[in-house]
C-alpha cells in the first residue's frame, strides 16, 4: 500500500462527490419532462421517434402497463440480438474478419446477458463477434438495458412522490428521453475522450504486424469500433468488453486517465440518482443519507481489497514483493503495470459495487480475501451505488425494509416519506430480496454436485473451485457480468442455465419493484408525527448499512466461509491445490 | 401493530388490443433505436475520430521501413538478450492480439506458484541473486501489457548492455528517458513502454 494509492482513492471520491448534484439535477429535469439545454438538438428527434413508433407521449401508464411495455421492449430487442448473432455470417455489412455465425446456446446466453445489463461473456469477442454484431447487436443493449434500469428507478421515485395516483409515468417517454438526453450525448463525448487516450475506433480488418525482433513472424492485431462501445459499456454499467481482456486490454483502457474516466463513469449516474431521489421527493437530506450509506460500504470494500492485494504471496521467494517508489507491492498476477495494485483493487471494487462487471484486472487471480470483496459486493445486491437505476431501486428496497424494522422496534406502522409501509409493500420487498439468493445458492449447489456439468469447467482446485462456480451464478443473477474467468463456461449447460438465471435475476426482481411503485403511488400522504422515523439522518444511514450487511451476511456467510475464507486460511498455512 | 392492512386493489382487465399495441410499439421502437444507437452512433464516432485522431483511431500502429511492426499500445514478444523483455503473456500462445486474457490462475494454484518460482530462479541466477521485480514474473490481465515497471527495466539493463557490448550507464540513461511518470503527476503507476524502449535502443545503440 502506498500514499499515492490512497491519494488516488481520495481524489476519485472527491471528483465523484462533485458530480452528484449537477448530474442528479440534470437527470431529474430530463425525467420530469422539463427543458434542458439539449432541447434544440434532440426535441425534434424525440417527437419523430414517438411518431414513428406510435407512442402517445402524454398518456400515463399504471404499473401493469409500464411493466408490459418494459417486457415487450426487452423481449423484442433480445430476439433482434439473437438473430443478428445467428446471421452475422450472411449479413452483408461490417464483418471484415468473416466471422462465422454464433452457435445457438452461446447466442442465447449472450443475448440474455446483454439484454439484462449483465454482459457475461463466455466467449472471446475478437474471434467470435463481427463488427455489426458488436455495434447493432451488443452495444445497442448497452444503451437499452441501462435505460430500462434508469426508468424503473424513476418510476419508483414517482411512486414515492405521487399521492392517490393510478399511474407512474409513460415507459416509452422515459426510455426515449433517457436515451436521447442522457446516454447519447454522454457516450458521444466520452467515446471521443477515449479515442484521444488511444482507444481505436475504425471498421478496418485486423492489422497484421511483423514484430521488431522476429519480422518473419506475425502478430495479428484485433481492431474495431472500440471507443463507441467502450463509452456506453461503462456509462450504462454494462461491462461487456469489446475484447476478451475487457478494460485490462490496452486498446480498451490505454492510460491511467482513461482508467480514471472509466471508474468515474461507472458511478456517475448511480450516484447522481441519489440526488435525483432527494430532489424529486423533496427530501434532499434523504438523498444524501442514501448516498452516505453507499459511500461507506464502497470505501470499506476498497480498503479490504487494496490491503489484501498488497500482501506478498507467502509461498513465493526471491521476488521484490514489498514495493518501492517505482514498482508496486503485492499481487501483480492478472494486473497491468499502468494501473498497479491500487487502481486494480479500486476498479474491482467499483465494478462489483455497481452491476458493471467490466474488469481491468483478472479477479480470478486476486488473493482469496481480495477476490472475496468483488464477490461479496455482488452478493450484497449491487446496491453500493449499483447499476444505473438498478442500484437505486435495489437500495430503496433495503430502505423500505429498514423503515419497516425501525417501525417494528417502536411498535408503529412504518412510514417512508409520508407513505405508510404496509404488508403488500413489505411482501414485494421481501420477494425482491429472497429471489436473489434462492437462484444463486440453488444453482451453485446443483453445479457443484455435478462432476460432468459443473466441475469439469473448473481451472483451479480446492476451495477456489467453489468460488469460481459461486462467482459465476452470483455475477449472472446479480446482472454483474464479471467473472472468475478461469471457469470455462462456454458449455451448453452453463450457457443455457446462466442465461436463464440472468433473466430471472433481472425481471423477477424488477417486476416487484414496479408493482411497489404502483402501490405506493396510489396511497395517501400522511403528515409526519413524533413517532415517524426520520430518513435524512446519520442514524438512518447507519441502520440502512446494517440492514444491507446483516441480510447479506445471514444469506451468504456460510458459503463464503467454504470458499474464499477457507482458501485464505489454507494458503496462509502453505496449502496449495 | 397495524402493518398488516388490506391488499390494494389493482385494475386487472387488460384488453387484447392493449397487448397488440405494446408489441407493435416494441417492434417499431426497437428498430428505430437499433438504427440510431447501433449504426448511427458508432459511425458518427468513427467519422469524427478518424478526422481528429487518425493515428489513435487506427490502433496507434508503428511502422518501420514501410512495414507495420506493431502497436505502441500492445506488447509483443522479445526473447533475445539484445532487447528488453515484456512481462510474460497468457494471451493465446503468448502476445496473441486476437486472444487477449490473463492466466486466471488462483493464488492457491500450485501451477501458478511453480511457474512464478521457476521464472524467479532463472532470472535471479543470471542477476547475482538480486530480488526479481514481481511484474517480470507475473502475467498481466490482458497478456498484452506494453509496460514494465522502471525497476523491471533497470533489472534487465546489465543483460542488454552486455549483449550489445556497451556501458551500463548509457542503457540506464535510455531507460530513464523512457519512464512515463504518473499521469497528471498523480494517476496510475510509473512505467516503461517496452516496444518504444527497444526501438530507441536499436536507433541509438547498435
Image (tube, coloured by chain):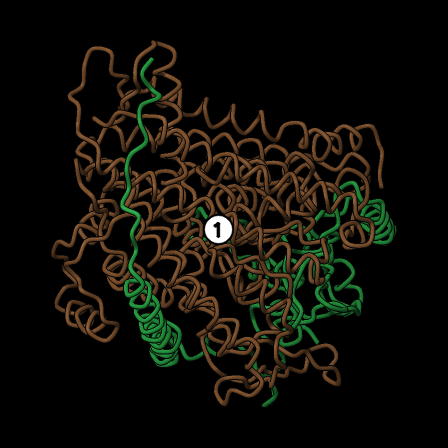
Residue A213 falls in which quadrant of the image? bottom right
> Which quarter of the rendered picture does the C terminus of chain A lie within?
top right
How many numbered marks have been drawn onto this rendered protein structure? Answer: 1
In the rendered image of this protein, does residue A63 appear above or below residue A431?
below
Q: Left or right: B9 with respect to A246?
A: left
Question: What x and y, as percent, mark residue A37?
Answer: 14, 60
* Residue found 63% across the figure and 27% down from its top: A557
To which quarter of the image does residue A492 belong?
bottom right
Would residue B52 be seen by someone viewing this image from the given angle?
no
Chain identifier, green in the render: B
**Which is more toward the observer, B161 or B142?**
B142
Above or below residue A414? Residue B73 is below
Specify whether A73 is left or right of A470.
Answer: left
Q: Which residue is mark 1?
A: A356
A23 or A154: nearer the viewer: A154
Q: Locate residue A369, reporting x and y percent.
A: 65, 34
Residue A528 on image: x %, y %: 18, 19
Residue placed at 28% from the left, 62% from the top?
B18
Q: Mark yes or no: residue A346 visible.
A: yes
Query: In terms of secondary structure, where does tag 1 sit?
Result: loop
Position of residue B206 measured from the top left corner of the image (x, y, whole percent): 71, 76
| Left or right of A101, for residue A410 | left
Quarter of the figure with the N terminus of chain A: top right
Q: Which chain is brown?
A: A
Kindly identify which chain the residue marked by label 1 belongs to.
Answer: A
Q: Residues within 10 Å of mark 1 (few under 14, many from 20)?
A: many
Q: Horizontal placement of B145 versus A198: left or right?
A: right
**Image: A567 above or below A113:** above
Task: Compare residues A24 and B95 and report the one nearer the observer.
Answer: A24
- The residue shown at (28%, 17%) is A533
Amino acid at each position: 500500500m502506498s500514499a499515492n494509492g490512497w491519494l488516488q482513492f481520495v481524489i476519485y471520491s472527491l471528483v465523484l462527490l462533485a458530480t452528484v448534484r449537477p448530474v442528479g439535477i440534470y437527470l431529474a429535469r430530463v425525467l420530469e419532462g422539463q427543458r434542458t439545454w439539449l432541447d434544440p438538438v434532440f426535441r425534434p428527434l424525440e417527437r419523430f421517434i414517438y411518431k414513428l413508433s406510435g407512442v402517445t407521449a402524454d398518456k400515463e401508464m399504471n404499473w401493469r402497463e409500464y411493466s408490459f411495455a418494459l417486457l415487450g421492449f426487452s423481449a423484442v430487442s433480445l430476439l433482434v440480438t439473437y438473430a443478428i448473432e445467428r446471421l452475422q455470417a450472411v449479413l452483408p455489412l461490417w464483418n471484415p474478419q468473416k466471422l462465422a455465425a454464433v452457435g445457438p446456446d452461446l447466442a442465447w446466453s449472450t443475448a440474455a446477458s446483454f439484454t439484462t445489463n449483465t454482459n457475461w461473456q463466455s466467449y472471446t469477442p475478437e474471434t467470435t463477434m463481427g463488427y455489426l454484431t458488436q455495434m447493432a447487436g451488443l452495444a445497442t443493449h448497452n444503451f437499452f438495458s441501462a435505460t430500462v434500469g434508469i426508468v424503473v428507478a424513476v418510476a419508483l421515485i414517482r411512486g414515492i412522490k405521487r399521492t392517490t395516483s393510478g399511474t407512474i409515468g409513460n415507459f416509452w417517454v422515459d426510455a426515449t428521453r433517457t436515451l436521447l438526453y442522457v446516454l447519447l450525448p454522454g457516450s458521444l463525448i466520452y467515446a471521443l475522450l477515449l479515442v484521444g487516450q488511444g482507444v481505436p475506433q475504425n471498421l478496418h480488418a485486423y492489422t497484421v504486424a511483423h514484430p521488431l525482433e522476429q519480422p518473419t513472424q506475425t502478430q495479428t492485431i484485433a481492431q474495431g469500433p472500440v471507443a463507441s462501445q467502450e463509452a456506453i459499456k461503462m456509462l450504462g454499467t454494462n461491462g461487456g468488453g469489446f475484447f476478451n481482456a475487457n478494460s485490462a486490454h490496452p486498446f480498451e483502457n490505454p492510460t491511467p486517465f482513461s482508467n480514471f474516466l472509466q471508474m468515474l463513469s461507472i458511478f456517475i449516474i448511480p450516484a447522481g440518482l441519489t440526488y435525483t431521489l432527494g430532489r424529486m421527493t423533496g427530501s434532499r437530506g434523504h438523498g444524501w443519507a442514501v448516498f452516505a450509506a453507499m459511500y461507506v460500504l464502497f470505501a470499506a470494500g476498497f480498503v479490504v481489497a487494496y490491503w489484501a492485494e498488497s500482501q506478498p504471496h507467502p509461498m513465493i521467494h526471491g521476488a521484490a514483493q514489498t514495493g518501492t517508489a517505482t514498482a508496486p507491492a503485492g499481487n501483480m498476477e492478472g494486473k497491468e503495470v499502468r494501473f498497479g495494485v491500487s487502481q486494480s483493487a479500486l476498479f474491482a471494487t467499483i465494478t462489483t459495487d455497481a452491476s458493471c462487471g467490466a474488469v481491468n484486472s483478472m479477479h480470478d487471480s486476486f488473493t482469496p480475501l481480495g477476490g472475496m470483496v468483488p464477490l461479496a459486493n455482488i452478493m450484497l445486491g449491487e446496491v453500493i451505488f449499483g447499476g444505473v437505476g438498478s442500484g437505486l431501486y435495489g437500495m430503496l428496497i433495503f430502505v423500505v425494509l429498514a423503515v419497516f424494522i425501525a417501525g417494528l422496534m417502536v411498535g408503529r406502522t412504518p412510514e417512508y416519506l409520508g407513505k405508510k409501509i404496509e404488508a403488500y409493500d413489505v411482501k414485494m420487498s421481501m420477494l425482491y430480496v429472497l429471489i436473489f439468493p434462492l437462484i444463486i445458492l440453488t444453482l451453485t449447489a446443483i453445479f457443484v454436485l455435478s462432476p460432468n456439468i459443473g466441475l469439469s469447467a473448473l481451472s483451479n482446485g480446492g476451495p477456489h473451485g467453489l468460488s469460481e462456480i459461486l462467482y459465476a451464478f452470483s455475477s449472472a443473477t446479480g446482472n454483474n457480468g464479471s467473472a472468475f474467468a478461469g471457469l470455462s463456461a462456454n458449455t451448453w449447460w452453463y450457457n443455457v442455465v446462466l442465461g436463464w438465471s440472468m433473466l430471472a435475476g433481472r425481471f423477477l426482481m424488477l417486476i416487484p419493484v414496479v408493482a411497489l411503485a404502483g402501490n405506493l403511488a396510489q396511497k395517501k400522504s400522511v403528515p409526519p408525527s413524533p413517532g415517524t422515523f426520520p430518513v435524512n439522518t446519520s442514524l438512518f444511514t447507519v441502520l440502512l448499512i446494517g440492514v444491507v450487511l446483516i441480510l447479506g451476511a445471514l444469506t451468504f456467510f456460510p458459503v463464503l466461509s467454504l470458499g474464499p475464507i477457507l482458501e485464505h486460511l489454507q494458503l496462509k498455512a502453505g496449502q496449495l491445490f | 401493530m397495524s402493518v398488516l392492512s388490506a391488499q390494494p386493489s389493482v385494475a386487472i382487465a387488460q384488453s387484447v388490443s392493449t397487448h397488440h399495441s405494446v408489441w407493435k410499439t416494441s417492434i417499431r421502437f426497437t428498430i428505430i433505436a437499433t438504427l440510431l444507437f447501433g449504426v448511427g452512433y458508432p459511425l458518427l464516432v468513427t467519422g469524427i475520430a478518424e478526422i481528429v485522431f487518425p493515428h489513435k483511431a487506427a490502433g496507434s500502429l508503428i511502422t518501420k521501413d514501410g512495414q507495420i511492426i506493431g502497436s505502441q499500445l500492445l506488447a509483443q514478444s522479445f526473447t533475445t538478450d539484445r532487447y528488453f523483455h515484456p512481462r510474460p503473456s497468457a494471451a493465446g500462445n503468448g502476445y496473441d492480439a486476437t486472444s487477449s486474457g490473463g492466466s486466471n490462475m488462483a493464488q492457491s494454484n500450485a501451477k501458478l506458484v511453480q511457474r512464478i518460482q521457476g521464472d524467479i530462479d532463472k532470472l535471479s541466477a543470471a542477476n547475482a541473486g538480486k530480488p526479481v521485480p514481481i511484474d517480470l514474473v507475473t502475467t498481466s490481465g490482458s497478456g498484452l501489457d506494453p509496460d514494465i515497471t522502471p525497476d523491471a527495466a533497470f533489472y534487465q539493463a546489465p543483460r542488454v548492455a552486455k549483449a550489445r557490448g556497451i556501458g551500463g550507464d548509457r542503457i540506464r540513461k535510455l531507460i530513464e528517458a523512457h519512464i512515463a511518470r504518473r499521469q497528471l503527476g498523480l494517476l496510475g503507476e510509473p512505467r516503461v513502454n517496452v516496444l518504444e524502449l527497444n526501438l530507441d535502443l536499436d536507433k541509438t545503440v547498435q
